[in-house]
Amino acid sequence: MDGRTADRDLRLTLGVLLLVYIFNFLDRQIVTILAEPIARDLDLSDTQIGVLTGLAFALFYTAMGVPIARIADRPTTNRVTVIVVSLAIWSGMTALCGLAQNFTQLLLARFGVGVGEAGGTPPSHSLISDKAPPEKRASAFGIYQLGPPIGGLMGMVLGGVLADSIGWRQAFMFVGLPGLLLALVVRLLVKDPRRTGTGATTDPTGLTTGAALDAIWQSPTMRRMLAVSCFAPFALYGMLIWTTIFFQRSHGLTAGETGVWFGLVNGIGAILGVWGGGRLGDRTMKRGAQHLLTVPALGLILTCPFTVAALLVADWHLALALLFPAVVMSWLYVAPFYSAVQGIVPPAARAVASASILFVQNLVGLGLGPVALGFVSDRLKPAYGDDSVRYVLIVASLAAVAAGLILLSARRPLAGELERYR
């Protein structure tokens, strides 16, 4: 495949996989803006909200992630098939959330969403890494990783509008069912290099699960990345979920108003952060491979003061204005982070490496984060009432600082490890 054809194939693959990732995050996060109407309708506690918005999804996502990624890493596996089947499962289960009549039924449907989405990102990361050369990989991931902020923006705005207009049950069905049609589009347009014989880093050999995990754990950079995966998502997911509730409780906004205003601030800020992080990653890397992580690390550290200021001001307009730079800086790390992860492990372990990162991210950040914050909020309610969420969010913002400091320390071994698998 000549250079122009390869670039065209990469752009097509990135475009389709980005659309899949948008649906992935839309289906995953719409429950965030719907949480308050669901809680009122089904009479749920804040701890139960935390379970539904985080732990219910994360448990099965993390449990299935590595086994599915191991299948995707096999040289005989068509990774596009894995993505298509996974997309159909999580879309169907999202629609079924709208039929739930109680906490248990909604919990089971969210389990199903987690099972499906476990097979979306790891094979996509592996495909992109096979098709994008190392010097363009951060920018490629900068495009693909736009899926979470765009999907999150759509989930906030669309979910809030649908919740106010047609109800939370219909909102789940409205966003879930189109994913079944998208699965057909993916099957028709995306090709796995293993089937076409293209891709600069396609590896004809396989690794056992133990060998893949050992290669991952032997990397000093990867061990630090796993630690970052504990703290950064705890801050990001915890703040995303509970900030929407914060604006409704502490500032009196409706679900629709919160979805539109916070959705725009969070969505646009995250889009700028992810895209900018990818471009800055490729640019700063020219001064030394270790600088791939410099700007992302500083961005995470600087997130905290802006977030704390936003939570303490009395005017919600000013709070949103202060949150915008915090959101941008908190998302700068994403594209360089995944670019580094994919570059420091053998090609035959890339999907497992991605799944390992996602395992930690979703178990700790998305799974335990919202539940822990919900539990603390319930404990603080007798003293602070609706403002209990304000104070747990201040604590959550400190996790971003910890992630930034660990990311700074990861720069030292990064350069040598990236050179190994160019």
Image (cartoon, rainbow, N blue to C red):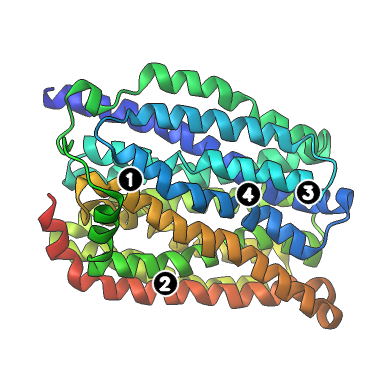
Which residue corresponds to the image point at 35% horizontal and 44% vertical from the top-left?
Answer: 70
Question: Badge 2, how many Cα within 10 Å: few under 14, some, many 20+?
Answer: many
Mark seen at residue 313:
none
User: In the image, residue 230 lies at what x, y percent?
Assistant: 46, 67
Amino acid carrying mark 2 in the image = Ala
Closest to the camera, between mark 3 and mark 1, is 3
Closest to the camera, between mark 3 and mark 4, is 3
Q: What element carries label 2?
A: helix
Which residue corresponds to the image point at 44% horizontal and 77% vertical from the top-left?
Answer: 402
Give the labeled residue for mark 4.
263
Mark seen at residue 351:
1
Mark before the other along the chain sequence, 3 or 2: 3
Amino acid carrying mark 3 in the image = Thr
Mark before the other along the chain sequence, 2 or 1: 1
Question: Badge 3, how many Cα within 10 Å: few under 14, some, many 20+?
Answer: few
Between 167 and 160, the residue placed more toward the observer is: 167
Quarter holding residue 368:
bottom right
Amino acid carrying mark 1 in the image = Ala
Q: Is mark 1 on a helix, strand or loop?
A: helix
Quarter holding residue 98:
top right
Closest to the camera, between mark 4 and mark 1, is 1
Q: In this view, does 326 lie to the left or right of 158?
A: left
Give the labeled residue for mark 2.
403
Residue 8 appears in the picture as rendered: no
Q: Distance between the residues labelled 4 and 1?
A: 31 Å
Contact, mark 3 vs mark 1 (Cβ under 8 Å): no
